[in-house]
C-alpha cells in the first residue's frame, strides 16, 4: 500500500510519528513491536513475521518455546 502525498515532520527529538490510521491498516496495535528495514534511501516498516531463527526463512516453520524453526534447519540439526 502506498499513500502518496503524506508528509510527516521529524520532531525535535528526531522521532517520526506514523499516523495511527496507517498502523491499524496493517494490524499494528499499541505496544506492538514493528520491524524497520533500511534499503538504500528507503525505510520500510512492517508488522513482524515469524521466521526461522537460524536461516531467516518465513516458510515451513514450526514453533517451539516461542521461537520458529524451519523444517530444513530442524533436519540439519537432527543429522
Ligand atoms: Zn531455517
Image (spheres, rainbow, N blue to C red):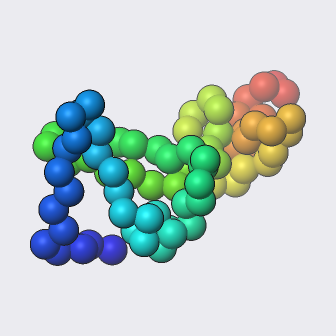
Which percent across, then down, holds residue 12? 21, 34
Image quadrant in which you'd find residue 67: top right
**79 w.r.t. 26: above or below:** above
- Quadrant location of the N terminus in the rendered image: bottom left
**Residue at left 29%, top 46%?**
16
Q: Quadrant of the C terminus?
A: top right
Identify which residue is drawn at 38% across, 51% down: 45
Q: Where is residue 22 in the image (x, y as percent from the top left)?
A: 40, 68
The spot of residue 52 in percent (x, y) is: 65, 39
Give above or below for 11 relative to 60. Answer: above
| Residue drawn at (39%, 43%) of the image | 36
Report if residue 72 is visible in the image.
no
Between 10 and 23, the one lying in front of the other is 10
Q: Is residue 50 visible?
A: yes
Quadrant of the rendered image containing residue 66: top right
Left or right: 53 as drawn, with respect to 66: left
Residue 18 falls in image quadrant = bottom left
> Which is nearer the eye, 2 or 39?
2
Q: Which residue lies furthest to the front in this view?
A: 12
Give the left or right position of residue 74, taking residue 25 as reference. right
Please determine whether, in this image, residue 8 is positioned above or below residue 22: above
Answer left or right for 69 relative to 50. right
Question: Is residue 36 toward the left or the right of residue 72 in the image?
Answer: left
Q: In this view, does 49 lie above or below 5?
A: above
How many numbered callouts?
Answer: 0
Q: Where is residue 44 in the image (x, y as percent from the top left)?
A: 32, 51
Amino acid at each position: 500500500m502506498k499513500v502518496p502525498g503524506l508528509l510527516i515532520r521529524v520532531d525535535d527529538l528526531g522521532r517520526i510519528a506514523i499516523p495511527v490510521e496507517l498502523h491499524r491498516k496493517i494490524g499494528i496495535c499499541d505496544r506492538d513491536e514493528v520491524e524497520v528495514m533500511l534499503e538504500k534511501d528507503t525505510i520500510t516498516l512492517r508488522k513482524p513475521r515469524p521466521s526461522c531463527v537460524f536461516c531467516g526463512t518465513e516458510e515451513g516453520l514450526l514453533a517451539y518455546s516461542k521461537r520458529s524453526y524451519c523444517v530444513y534447519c530442524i533436519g540439519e540439526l537432527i543429522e
